[in-house]
Image (cartoon, rainbow, N blue to C red):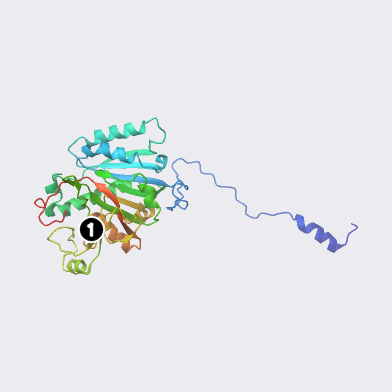
């Protein structure tokens, strides 16, 4: 009472009592059937290992027993932390023991006592699509079989993707079962480019007189041409263009014919179509609805249609012409496939 009114106001200015109007306590949900998913923290960045970003490796399989042992030998050598990797496989229209061999291999890996070997999880999906064509080279790569084959493969990829993709996945890595050689750091190498969609060059070893001819394998990774666009304009919207056959002369530039593994592995090339042997995709590309069309999309299907769809949606589609992943030699000969440049 011995201070003035002004002094009293100054004294009390630093200790005002807070008043909360319409204050709400946190809303607590105790119903087990209600789930909350926050996708905002899920990113795909160059710092994937440091940020502990999870990767989903997807592999479609059909009559693949022969290749599974080598597949798992290569996958277990990947240096990206295995506790951040989920594996998922779709087995469809198989007549061999693919499911049994696959289960055995997965169990062998997941029971390994070395903590660096087992993966975070492994999933096997079974789904038949009514594909009855032979798996021999002449039938599988014949021109007449390409349309139905690519449509069925697209469906298999989509079924696998939508079954296995989880909210915490940052990257999706498509990897075929019949890869012969690939770098152990392939995931880190690809992620370092920070591209929406990335593919390497696909070649194969074939030895003649002790010399490796280094054959070019994948003609589905290409740059668009005016000739191909003009050709597509003359075709029905339901016609699917396939590469490497005399029936469709597209004049496109094939990444398989470019590059050299002896040169800078990080050189980039913009592409309009891609093959499916090895693809790294930011998971949000798939979440945004870009999948593998099992129909003609801009006269392309499956992986080439996927690339076309991604570019239409504004995503990057990049190839690495000097980064070579080696496929098994399918022993294609000029007499097998007519004019196809195998």
**Could you say which is closer to the camera, residue 267 or residue 340?**
267
The image shows residue 57 at horizontal and vertical percentages of 34, 45
Q: Quadrant of residue 128?
A: top left
Residue behind mark 1: 257
93 vs 283, left or right, is left
The image shows residue 215 at horizontal and vertical percentages of 20, 51
Residue 191 can be seen in this image: yes
185 vs 301, left or right, is right
**Vertical side of 197 occupied by 115: above or below:** above
- Residue extending furthest toward the right: 2
The image shows residue 73 at horizontal and vertical percentages of 30, 37
Residue 163 can be seen in this image: no
SS for callout 1: helix
Residue at the image point whose x is 84% and y is 63% from the top: 6
The image shows residue 247 at horizontal and vertical percentages of 12, 61
**Could you say which is closer to the camera, residue 267 or residue 63?**
267
Locate the N terminus and report the quarter of the image it occupies: bottom right
Residue density around tag 1, few if under 14, some if 14–19, many if 20 or more, within 10 Å: some
């Amino acid at each position: 009472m011995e201070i003035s009114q002004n002094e009293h106001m100054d004294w009390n200015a630093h200790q005002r009592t807070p008043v909360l109007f319409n204050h709400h306590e946190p809303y607590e949900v105790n119903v087990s059937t209600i789930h909350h998913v926050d996708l905002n923290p899920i990113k795909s960045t160059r710092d994937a290992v440091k940020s502990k970003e999870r990767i989903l490796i997807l592999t479609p399989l059909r009559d693949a027993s022969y290749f599974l042992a080598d597949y798992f030998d290569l996958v277990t050598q990947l240096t990206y932390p295995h506790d951040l990797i989920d594996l998922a496989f779709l087995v469809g229209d198989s007549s061999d023991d693919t499911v049994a061999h696959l289960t055995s291999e997965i169990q062998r890996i997941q029971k390994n006592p070395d903590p660096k070997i087992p993966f975070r999880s492994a999933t096997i999906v079974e789904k038949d699509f009514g594909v009855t064509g032979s798996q021999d080279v002449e039938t599988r790569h014949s021109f007449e079989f390409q349309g139905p084959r690519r449509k069925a493969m697209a469906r298999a990829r989509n079924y696998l993707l939508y079954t296995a993709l989880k909210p915490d996945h940052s990257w999706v890595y498509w990897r075929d079962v019949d890869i012969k050689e690939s770098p152990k750091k392939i995931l880190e190498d690809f992620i370092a480019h920070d591209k929406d969609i990335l593919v390497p060059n696909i070649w194969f070893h074939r030895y003649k007189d002790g010399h490796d001819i280094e054959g070019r394998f994948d003609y589905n990774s290409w740059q668009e041409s005016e000739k191909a666009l003009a050709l597509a304009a003359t075709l029905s919207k339901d016609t699917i263009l396939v590469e490497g056959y005399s029936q469709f002369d597209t004049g496109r530039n094939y990444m398989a014919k470019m590059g050299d593994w002896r040169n800078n592995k990080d050189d980039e090339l913009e592409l309009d179509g891609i093959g499916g042997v090895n693809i790294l995709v930011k998971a949000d590309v798939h979440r945004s609805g870009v999948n593998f069309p099992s129909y003609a999309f801009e006269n392309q299907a499956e992986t080439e249609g996927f690339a076309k769809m991604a570019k239409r949606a504004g995503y990057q589609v990049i190839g690495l012409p000097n980064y070579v992943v080696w496929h098994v030699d399918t022993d294609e000969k000029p007499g097998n496939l007519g004019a196809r440049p195998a």
